[in-house]
Amino acid sequence: MVLESETSLKHDYIISNGIRLHYVTQGEGELMLLLHGFPEFWYSWRYQIPEFATDYKVVALDLRGYNDSEKPEGREAYAITELVKDIEGVIKGLGYEQCVLVGHDWGGMLAWNFAYAHSEMVEKLIVMNLPHPAKFVQALRTNPQQMLRSWYILLFQLPLVPEFLLQADDYRMIASIFVETAIDKTAFPPQDLEAYKKAAAKPGALTAMLNYYRHNFLGLFNPTEWTVLQVPTMMIWGENDTALGKELTYDTQEYVKHLQLRYLPNCSHWVQQEQPELVNQYMGDFLDT
């Protein structure tokens, strides 16, 4: 893997919310906390960690259930409320009161929820290819195209079948999730795909990863009053996302007072890996303002 030989990259563990979480860190200064999505782990931030370690203490977390983090049993262990507590515990456990919070995909969902629950702990928020929760729920209720795009969420509700499909033929589907949806296929060379497959193959990981969907899907439809978020926020959006339509970003300013929105044409869901230089540029510009 690209960063494993970097001597300045440190692997460590922290106890947060009663479980042991693995993270990778580089740099010193204010805290930048990176939250990955499905079916990834800290490695999805391999291009952002060294870029921002010159100015921040960058911490790329393995979310609970993923890679080398603890994998508690039971769907309820993956409730968004528990995941938000994980993030709170990590920030405080590292000795900080506030951070720049960056999330992609499921990490983006957690970042949104954390920013609402603990806005005082988020200096700035950056979310990639995950709409505001209110916009996502609205689309699942009223947008037939988005309903079709989200078919896999229903598949993931089944017991055992998704685990079987994902691990079949040496976890071939894990690799195909990246390659088949990416615009630039070269963004995922064989060694990177092997890294994702290896992480997914760790005991208990597949079921834990799927429990994010299994426990929280129906909860998305519970009535929720989303106020206007005061935290300065940037959304970065790959326009060729096969799972989430660009229209889910429209009118986000109804829920976010200070919003910057950056679209990346000819880019898939995997923005920070497919166009890392542009993503890093947008992040840097936002953080400098």
Image (tube, rainbow, N blue to C red):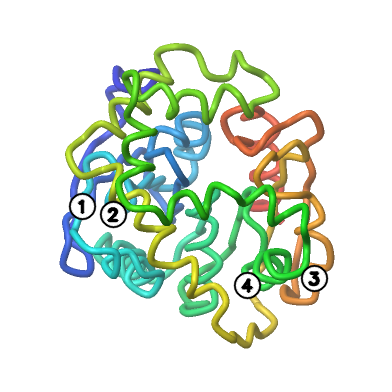
Q: Position of residue 154 (x, y in %)?
A: 51, 55
Q: Secondary structure at mark 2?
A: loop
The answer to whether residue 160 shows anywhere in this view is yes
User: Residue at (31%, 28%) from the top-left corner?
Assistant: 8
In the image, 160 versus 206, the foreground residue is 160
Question: Which mark is on residue 71?
Answer: 1
Of the pair 48 and 37, the residue shown nearer to us = 37
Closer to viewer: mark 4 or mark 2: 2
Q: Residues within 10 Å of mark 4 (few under 14, many from 20)?
A: some
Q: Which residue is mark 4?
A: 231
* The C terminus: image quadrant: bottom right
Mark 4 vs 1, N-terminal side: 1
Q: Secondary structure at mark 1?
A: loop
Q: Secondary structure at mark 3?
A: helix
Earlier sequence position, callout 1 versus callout 3: 1
Alpha carbon of mark 4 to alpha carbon of mark 1: how far?
31 Å
Residue 34 seen in this snapshot:
no
Residue 57 in percent (x, y) is at: 39, 47
Badge 1 amino acid: Lys
Whichever of labels 4 and 2 marks the residue nearer the N terminus, that label is: 2
Mark found first going from the N terminus, 3 or 4: 4
Measured Cα–Cα span from mark 1 to mark 2: 6 Å
